[in-house]
Amino acid sequence: MDNTSDLRVLLGSRHPLLFVETQDEERFLVLLRDAAWDLDLPVWTWTATKGLARDEKDPQYGTRDPSRAFEWIKYLDQPAVFVFADIHPHLDNPQVVRAVKELAQDAREGQTIVLTAPNRTIPAELNGLALPWNLSPPGEDELHRLIHRTLEDLTERRFTVDLDDSDVDRLVVAVRGLSLREAEHLLQQAAFRDGQLTGEDIADVRRAKAELLSSDGILELVEAEVGTLDEVGGLDGLKQWLRVRRAAHEDGGMEPARGILLTGIPGCGKSFVAKTLARSWDLPLVLLDPSRLYRPYIGETEQRLQESLRSIDALAPAVLWIDEIEKGFAAGGMSDSGVSQRLLGTFLRWMQERKPGVFLVATANDVSQLPPELLRKGRFDETFFVDLPDTAARRAIFALHLAKRDIELTEHELARLVKNSDGFSGAEIESAVVGAVYRAFGADRPIAGSDIEAEMAATVPLSISRSEDVLALRAWASDRAVAA
């Protein structure tokens, strides 16, 4: 059901009090008036600057004070809809809250009071009486109309518009989740950049949307200058799994994969997989840092998570990366008055109910900290264990980092490095190569395989310094995860 139909049902079923969370007030009022028109209901709108006015006519004298406006409504006996826009600052006043409650309880048949606010903070006195309602983002029909209207405007203003029907469909996907005003702004911005709007601008529009939706600092759009999955050393099982899921979705119309959990030894490429996956699938990569969610005030942390998840849904299709997920959704969590437990509950509901389009890549170094609710079958499509690289994987990792720095070694040197790096993680191999570059630079000579060997000899790998932890991780994964 679309927004207008939903509002029509709510008004027709005679709910006396609605609490609407929206940051797109102009669009909401248009939709509400359409719904009220179908039911032959007049719409009265109150604002703090104008007071109470019917159908955009002159306001009633002295009604800028919300209490006076409520008193005025008491004398109206005909059915109507009364919208109080941005009423939330006044809801700290117990007299205003009581006036709203009494007005709703005594509302005449066919009268509905609508309170709007950018965030949902319903006073406790109105719980059970106020019906919460969210304005859903514009649907595809609304976005199509907006895009065609904007393209006509750009053409009349002598901008070059070179888009076919498939490009318009891609633009609809690119701006999905934004308000109509935000979507129009991004289209105008793309056209003003070089005086034209073409299919090549769609990626820029999508990137601008991601930046807009991640402006609160919780979400971060990651512009990863990395290769594709094919360039990842080792992890053949994981790469094949991802290829099959992607190909089945694109070619067979099958339901897309929803997410994976990557656990294993630190420094073995879990985060690198998330970056290369997004690039391989040509999707934006969005990082959610759970540590940025926490705020000191009651309910604010949970609200920030809900807003972030709505933004993520709006970004679809996209890859969502949660790095070290155990730091945000750890087991226990009662020491913080249950905030962690509520965050976990909200996140699990989102995982269960979200629509396809957001592929979740969660990484964890310490799976023992994860709650069992997050690990049960069905939360993720699969759980992969990323172990230390074997011989073939280490060779591929060395080849990647040597080629990246234009270092040429003989086959004999490369073979020695692969052999002597047994027990090293991918990150430790890269660190050895980087250290060797500085070593050779300091000696003012070309880099040699011996420089890398010297760096490795001076390194105590994690597999030795924390051998007990590595063994414990492998023991956990033996019957709980698939080898990557």
Image: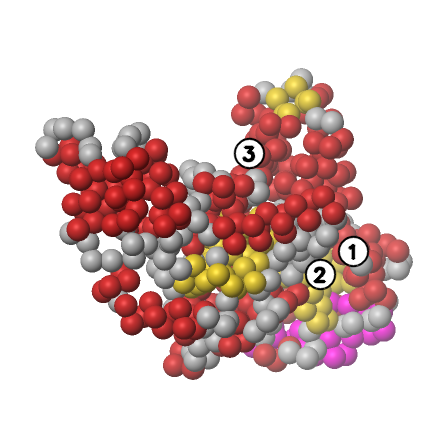
Q: Which percent across, then down, holds residue 427?
A: 31, 50
Q: Are marks 2 and 1 in contact (CB under 8 Å)?
A: no
Q: Label 3, label 1: how many angstroms apart (C-alpha)?
A: 29 Å
Q: Which callout, 2 or 1, points at the residue further toward the start of the chain? A: 1
In the rendering, which numbered label is found on residue 83? 2
The residue to which callout 3 is attached is 204
Q: Which percent across, then down, holds residue 53?
A: 73, 55
Q: Secondary structure at mark 3?
A: helix
Q: Secondary structure at mark 2?
A: strand
Mark whose residue sits in front, 2 or 3: 3
In the rendering, which numbered label is found on residue 375? none
Q: Which callout, 2 or 3, points at the residue further toward the start of the chain? A: 2
Residue 286 visible (yes or no): no
Q: Residues within 10 Å of mark 3 (few under 14, many from 20)?
A: some
Q: In the image, which residues are magenta?
A: 92-113
Q: Label 2, label 1: how many angstroms apart (C-alpha)?
A: 20 Å
Residue at the image position 44 percent from the left and 77 percent from the top: 331
Q: Label 2, label 3: how many angstroms apart (C-alpha)?
A: 38 Å
In the rendering, which numbered label is found on residue 2? 1
Relative placement, left or right, of 141 versus 233 is: right
Q: Which callout, 3 or 1, points at the residue further toward the start of the chain? A: 1
Type of amino acid at the residue the image marks with label 2:
Val
Q: Are marks 3 and 1 in contact (CB under 8 Å)?
A: no
Residue 266 visible (yes or no): yes
Q: Is residue 162 above or below residue 287?
A: above
Q: Residues within 10 Å of mark 1 (few under 14, many from 20)?
A: few
Type of amino acid at the residue the image marks with label 1:
Asp
